[in-house]
Image: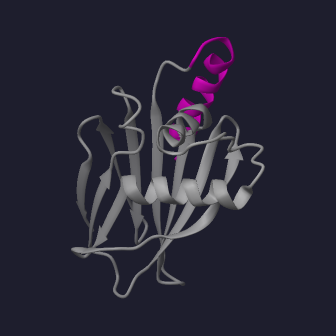
Amino acid sequence: MYLFGILFSMLMVFNGAIRHPIYLSVVNIEENKKDHTLEITCKIFTNDFEAALRKNNPGKIDLLHPKDKAQMELMVNRYIQQHLKISVNTIEQKMLFLGYEQNEDAIESYFQINCQAPPTEIAIEDNILYDVQKDQISVVHVTINGNRKSNKLTNPDDKIELKF
């Protein structure tokens, strides 16, 4: 995540002068052994995320200052659930939406998956923002039992399978 922080910070410097030149989202999946869960964070540039939400939702989209926070949370949850699928040990999982917040020029949304058994295989289908940006890149970090694996997906590639 440190490398992403540096890259994301560099992009923020350029964002003030021009539209950011890289279309990037980051999905971080981390095992919480104590709670038997996977904790998922999706980090997406705010302006790109709002553009994606506008494609399928009428009315004003404002993630930073919503008139109706519950309605924005519903839209964020629905969009991520449609564009991020996670299977654990070959079984597709339902993600529990925990909320979202602004972090610099990005929106971080939080999800959780309850694990019945320790994860040994994780399959990810991630096409976040592929519907609005043909040059979209997604960086995926997965940490299971302290072992971290990272991959990059570039539109139209959207599938990763990892074994731990």
Q: Is residue 120 left or right of residue 140?
A: left
Let me know if residue 15 appears in the view: yes
Answer with the quarter of the image where residue 54 lies.
top right
Q: Is residue 35 highlighted in magenta?
A: no
Q: Is residue 115 left or right of residue 68?
A: left
At horizontal 29% and vertical 69% (from top left) the residue drawn is 87
Q: Main secondary structure of the magenta part?
A: helix
Residue 152 image offset from top left, x and y in percent: 33, 40
Q: Is residue 142 above or below residue 20?
A: below
At horizontal 43% and vertical 67% (from top left) the residue drawn is 146
Looking at the rendered structure, the number of numbered marks drawn on it comes to 0
Looking at the figure, which quarter contains the C terminus?
bottom left
Residue 138 image offset from top left, x and y in percent: 39, 40
Q: Is residue 160 above or below residue 139?
A: below
Residue 125 image offset from top left, x and y in percent: 29, 54
Q: Nearer the viewer, residue 60 or 73?
A: 60
Answer with the quarter of the image where residue 76 lies.
bottom right
Q: Which residues are magenta?
A: 1-19
Answer with the quarter of the image where residue 128 lies.
top left
Residue closest to the far front: 58
Q: Is residue 10 highlighted in magenta?
A: yes
Q: Nearer the viewer, residue 153 or 156?
A: 156
At horizontal 30% and vertical 58% (from top left) the residue drawn is 124
